[in-house]
Image: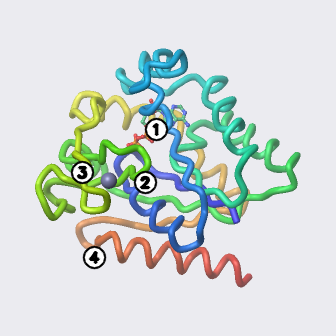
Amino acid sequence: MNIIMLGAPGTGKGTIGAEICKHYNLTHLATGDIFRDEIKRQTELGKKANEYISKGQLVPDEITIAMVEGKLDKMDGVLLDGFPRTINQAESLKKYLAEHNKEITVVINLVVPDEDIIKRTVSRVICSNKECGASYNTIFMPPKVEGICDKCGSKLIKRADDNEETIKQRLAVYYKNTEPLINYYKNEGLLESVDINIYLPTTKEITTAKSIKIIENRLNN
Ligand code: ADP
Ligand code: ZN
């Protein structure tokens, strides 16, 4: 089974994706996490990626696609979180999967209003331990002990690109480059959307349960 998590920045792709991975024993491939690790280790790829990420822009397709395909070669049963983000990336992925006799099971599109996205990202903190990668929100989903990860006890840190200015830029990039993927995957018959807003119950557990139900329906049809 191969799942794609789609959605604007800060909609919960990583948080819900991690729960889905646990449930189905999938490998979580989060392009943003991989880039942040490369930046931390100051690799060539990291230095290049940081030029774009720090400005809220997308890392160029050729860099991103090569990186993802290099990882996919070693994986079976994967959840893609943050990839594809452009039509070009989606086309490359389609070709890659066809050549490897694999297919996408479903694309889960998380839908959150823009005002909520800004609130969620400015108050987001993430685990500094890359093996863990847990994400929290100091207002809506706080850790049990301030500044410490519930799951692994490591320090929580703020992402450099989670400031209001960069988030607005990332949202603009989302609407220009990534939102067209909604129609793309609708046409492929793969899209399923989950609405998350203040008028609906929005805990992580509820969104996870809705997503798993969607996957089960796909698997049984
Ligand atoms: P979020 O979903 O909160 O924006 P991510 O961790 O998925 O955060 O991504 C952080 C940044 O990494 C993006 O703003 C972008 O610069 C870069 N990035 C991640 N995935 C991709 C991708 N598939 N293509 C291009 N750039 C990417
Ligand atoms: Zn942790």
Characterize the local packing of mark 1: few (<14), some (14-19) or many (20 or more) Cα atoms within 10 angstroms.
Answer: some
Q: Nearer the viewer, residue 3 or 115?
A: 3
In-image side of 37 versus 218 (left or right):
left
**Mark 2 near mark 1, Cβ–Cβ under 8 Å?**
yes
| Residue 169 drawn at (x, y percent) | 34, 29
As shown in the figure, which amino acid type bears the numbered disc 2? Gly
Q: Nearer the viewer, mark 2 or mark 3?
A: 2
Please tell me which of labels 2 and 4 falls first in the chain. Answer: 2
Distance CA(mark 2)–CA(mark 1): 10 Å
The amino acid beneath tag 4 is Pro
Q: Quadrant of the C terminus?
A: bottom right
Under circle 2, the secondary element is helix
Please report whichever mark, 4 or 1, sits nearer to the chain's N-terminal start. 1
Q: Is residue 29 left or right of residue 9?
A: right
Residue topped by disc 4: 201
Q: Residues within 10 Å of mark 2 (few under 14, many from 20)?
A: many
**Quadrant of the image containing the N terminus:** bottom right
**Closer to the N terminus: mark 1 or mark 3?**
1
Q: Is residue 143 left or right of residue 175?
A: left
The correct choice, above or below, for 202 with respect to 92 in the image is below
Pointer 1 residue: 32
View extreme (bottom): residue: 220
Cα separation between marks 4 and 3: 16 Å
Q: Report the coloring of the rendering.
A: rainbow
Counting residues from the start of the chain, the first of labels 2 and 3 encountered is 2
Question: Residue beneath label 2, please?
Answer: 14
Mark 3 — residue?
Answer: 120
